[in-house]
Amino acid sequence: MRAFLTKLLFKLPKGILIKWSGKEQIQKGYRKLDPGFQYLLKVMNDSGASLDTTKPAADLRKDFEEGRSLISASLPSGIKITDHYIKTNDHEIKVREYSPETIGNIYPALVYFHGGGWVIGSIDSHEAFTGFLAKELKAKVFSVDYRLAPEHPFPIPLADCEAAYNWIKDNALDLGINPNRVSVGGDSAGGNLAAALCVKCQQEELMMPKAQLLIYPVTDLTLENPSIDEMADGFFLTKDSMHFFREQYLENEDLAKDPLVSPLFAEDLSGHPPAVVVTAGFDPLRDEGDKYAQALRQANVEIYHRTHDSYIHGFVNMMMVNGVVYALKRICDDFKKIF
């Protein structure tokens, strides 16, 4: 009931949300924080739902899953869910399929990797958004439950994502999808894994995905871009959190310039799939996302770059904030052009 009432509050006028946030509307340069997000940040801080990276990874995951009830939406109607289990040499990977019930037998497919700094997050935490994608794109979306750090550091999460992607391609006809229309995507660390998978396909001269959907992706794990410091604290994802996630994901910080860790360091992005890159203004990862979009464009890759200057990191899972659903539909409209 509390979560339901909290979500209703976001329908109130922007002036009231600013007042209830307890401070003037936050501005950084020309960017003004959306009132809905400013109020949401207060709600999250007051409820203890903010990330506390002083805790062990297992406790952080538990807190994250419990706290998401404050912000998560419901799975859209008309979406069928099927769980698949992919056997590898040493592990079984769970992949959840989201299928719209309103179109024909052969679907395009999006293989989706959830965010969470390679440490937290799950197919459950992103279920509302992956279901939304399936409905809006009229496609099958396969959400991959890759293994998490620090128990499973780089390159294990990437290897799991690659194995899931290959299994989906190899079994396309049985899954009712078009083998020539299999794309990859993800948000934050998941966007990193999607971009890194494309780098790996290029390195190994394998067939590329049809397209890539990169939502506020990690593309430079050196953490040296100006927005890391400019948006270091107060906007959900913090500079300290990113350093924590890097420490968990990489056994050696020198790996940060490996293109499979930081796709921005890839020598050549030509031949990469068409891409939609989405960035948020109040996000420590903003600059590296902008730079990756620019690098793809300079490599003559078809690119649609959407910037949401008044939004924070993680907004795809914050659909109760006015304007977010509209923004997500526009992102899907862009992706349909290349998908």
Image (cartoon, rainbow, N blue to C red):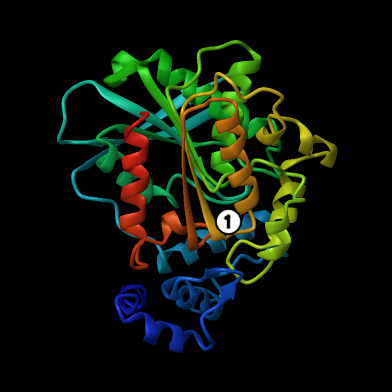
Q: Is residue 34 visible?
A: yes
Residue positioned 48% across, 24% down in the render: 165
* Direction from residue 3 to residue 304 in the image, left or right: right
Residue wearing tag 1: 61
Vertical position of residue 101 compared to residue 150: above or below: above
Which quadrant would residue 221 be assigned to in this image?
A: top right
Vertical position of residue 49 compared to residue 182: above or below: below
Disc 1 element: helix
* Direction from residue 8 to residue 295 in the image, left or right: right
Residue positioned 55% across, 77% down in the render: 26
Which quadrant would residue 6 be assigned to in this image?
A: bottom left
Residue positioned 61% across, 61% down in the render: 237
| Residue 34 percent coordinates (x, y) | 45, 71
Q: Is residue 218 visible?
A: no
Query: Which quadrant, please, contains the N terminus?
Result: bottom left
Q: Residue furthest top?
A: 205
Category of crowding for the residue at label 1, using alpha-carbon neighbours closer than 10 angstroms: few (below 14), some (14–19), many (at least 20): some
Work out whether residue 8 or residue 86 is closer to the camera in this orientation and state it: 8
| Residue 257 percent coordinates (x, y) | 78, 35
| Residue 124 percent coordinates (x, y) | 42, 49
Work out whether residue 103 or residue 339 is closer to the camera in this orientation and state it: 339
* Direction from residue 142 to residue 245 in the image, left or right: right
Number of numbered callouts drawn: 1
| Residue 157 percent coordinates (x, y) | 62, 34
* Direction from residue 98 to residue 307 in the image, left or right: right
Residue positioned 63% across, 21% down in the render: 200
Query: Which quadrant, please, contains the C terminus?
Result: top left
Vertical position of residue 42 compared to residue 154: above or below: below
Work out whether residue 155 or residue 312 is closer to the camera in this orientation and state it: 312
- What amino acid does circle 1 point to? Arg
